[in-house]
């Protein structure tokens, strides 16, 4: 046994072990990695993802619970952007402070609405009440003129309940006035200091990408302004054409019928069909000739509004496909009622801008984030420069 130890040396840890067999104090001991061993950067990124997902879920839950209020806020922001644009334009033309011009714009809008309500309101309410009371008789006469069966063109007994559920937040006068006040307050605050809110959004990104975010916000602003201008001009033009045309035809309740047709123009796709339906029914109740003239007026007015006025005013910024509008109306109408149907076009327009600027541009077309006002040549030179090409891994 001693001879074996002499040949092979003593085992480590025995008294006979020599210095050569002792462990070196400077040798680095590498621990065996486990699946749970991760880098500090990965752990920070994982915590960031967890917090982001949690905040997203909480935001979706809060958004669902407060969807009506959020849509009212969205409408108020859109109106505030329009007030800001109008006040800035007047201040640049007249050389006056923008705050003074903003006050004049708001007073002008509120005063115009109040004056219209005072001048036309009594006539409008009286004609609407007379048409509602004579509704069954008018429908029966129109049905007889067209030879439609008796079970067609009838007023549903639950029409009032259906209308109340469809209108949602505007189902009562008090709710409608409160909603208008909320929209006006949000619009005033947005128009007074828009820079404060845009700067708050821009600060979420680093300085290098802040000009790009500002350019995206400018595109969103353009969508909202284009939509509001298009809707306002379309309602005014169609209401004027309807009032003049129905008065020439000689239909009773021309003011109420024209106001109803103009008001429902704000609802895309289905609004014009529903808006002109009462006028067409009243026209055929007066006879075949007035009915055909009313039908022709509706077709011509809608063609002018849909093919000339709205595309000319709104432009390509709010160009949303009809199929997408119908799908959006179904979804948003189910989720948020009347407000969802009303705001489907600006919501889809803003969504398309975000998808185009944040996804299609950088990831599909290969466009780098460029600040507002930079030229396409600068962007092309940036993409072609060696610094813009990522190093191979």
Image (cartoon, grey):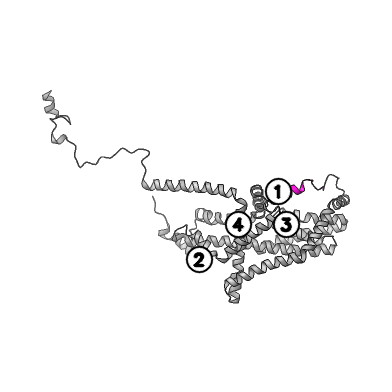
Q: Residue furthest bottom?
A: 95
What's the distance in space between the residues labelled 3 and 1, CA to CA? 17 Å
Q: Earlier in the sequence, mark 3 or mark 2?
A: 3
Residue to which mark 1 is pinned: 165
Q: Residues within 10 Å of mark 1 (few under 14, many from 20)?
A: some
Does 154 lie within the magenta span? Answer: yes
Position above or below: 327 against 232: above
* Proximity of marks 1 and 4: CB atoms separated by less than 8 Å: no
| Magenta range | 153-167
Q: Image check: 170 left or right of 222?
A: right
Of badges 3 and 4, nearer the viewer stands 4
The answer to which of marks 1 and 4 sits earlier in the sequence is 4
Residue at image point 40% right, 59% down: 387
Residue at the disc numbered 4: 73
Circle nearer the viewer, 3 or 1 = 1
Residue 133 x, y percent position in the rendering:
83, 53
Nearer the N terminus, badge 3 or badge 4? 4
Dot 1 lies on which element? helix
Residues under labels 3 and 2: Cα distance? Answer: 42 Å
User: Is residue 44 in the magenta section?
Assistant: no
**From mark 1 to mark 4, how far is it between C-alphas?**
21 Å
Residue at the disc numbered 3: 264
Indicate which disc residue 375 carries: 2
Q: Residue at x 69, y 64 (%)?
A: 233
Give the alpha-carbon distance from disc 4 to disc 2, as whole Å.
Answer: 35 Å
Left/right of residue 253 with respect to residue 106 in the rendered view: right
**Which of disc 1 and disc 2 is earlier in sequence?**
1
């Amino acid at each position: 046994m001693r001879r074996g130890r002499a040949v092979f040396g003593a085992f480590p840890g025995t008294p006979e072990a020599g210095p050569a067999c002792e462990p070196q104090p400077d040798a680095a001991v590498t621990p065996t990695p486990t699946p749970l061993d991760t880098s500090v950067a990965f752990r920070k990124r994982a915590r960031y993802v967890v917090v982001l997902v949690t905040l997203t879920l909480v935001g979706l839950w809060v958004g669902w619970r407060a969807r009506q209020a959020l849509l009212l806020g969205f409408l108020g922001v859109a109106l505030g952007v329009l007030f800001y644009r109008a006040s800035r334009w007047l201040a640049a033309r007249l050389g006056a402070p923008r705050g003074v011009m903003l006050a004049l714009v708001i007073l002008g809008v509120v005063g115009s609405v109040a004056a219209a309500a005072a001048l036309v309101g009594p006539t409008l309410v009286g004609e609407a009440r007379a048409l509602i009371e004579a509704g069954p008789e008018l429908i029966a006469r129109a049905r007889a003129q067209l030879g439609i069966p008796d079970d067609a063109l009838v007023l549903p007994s639950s029409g009032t309940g259906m209308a109340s559920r469809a209108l949602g937040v505007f189902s009562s006068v008090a709710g409608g006035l409160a909603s208008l006040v909320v929209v006006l307050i949000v619009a005033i605050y947005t128009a007074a200091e828009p820079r404060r809110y845009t700067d708050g959004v821009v600060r979420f990104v680093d300085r290098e990408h802040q000009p790009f975010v500002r350019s995206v916000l400018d595109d969103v602003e353009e969508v909202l302004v284009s939509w509001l201008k298009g809707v306002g001009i379309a309602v005014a033009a169609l209401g004027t054409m309807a009032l003049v045309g129905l008065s020439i035809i000689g239909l009773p309740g021309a003011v109420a019928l024209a106001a109803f047709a103009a008001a429902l123009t704000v609802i895309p796709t289905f609004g014009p069909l529903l808006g002109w339906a009462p006028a067409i029914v009243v026209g055929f109740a007066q006879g075949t000739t007035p009915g055909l003239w009313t039908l022709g007026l509706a077709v011509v007015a809608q063609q002018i509004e849909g093919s000339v006025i709205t595309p000319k005013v709104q432009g390509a910024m709010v160009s949303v496909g009809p199929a997408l509008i119908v799908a959006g109306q179904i979804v948003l109408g189910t989720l948020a009622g009347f407000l969802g149907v009303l705001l489907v076009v600006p919501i889809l327009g803003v969504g398309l801008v975000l998808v185009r600027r944040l996804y299609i541009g950088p990831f599909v077309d290969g466009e780098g984030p460029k600040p507002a006002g930079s030229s396409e040549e600068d962007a092309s030179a940036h993409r072609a420069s060696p610094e813009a090409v990522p190093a191979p891994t």
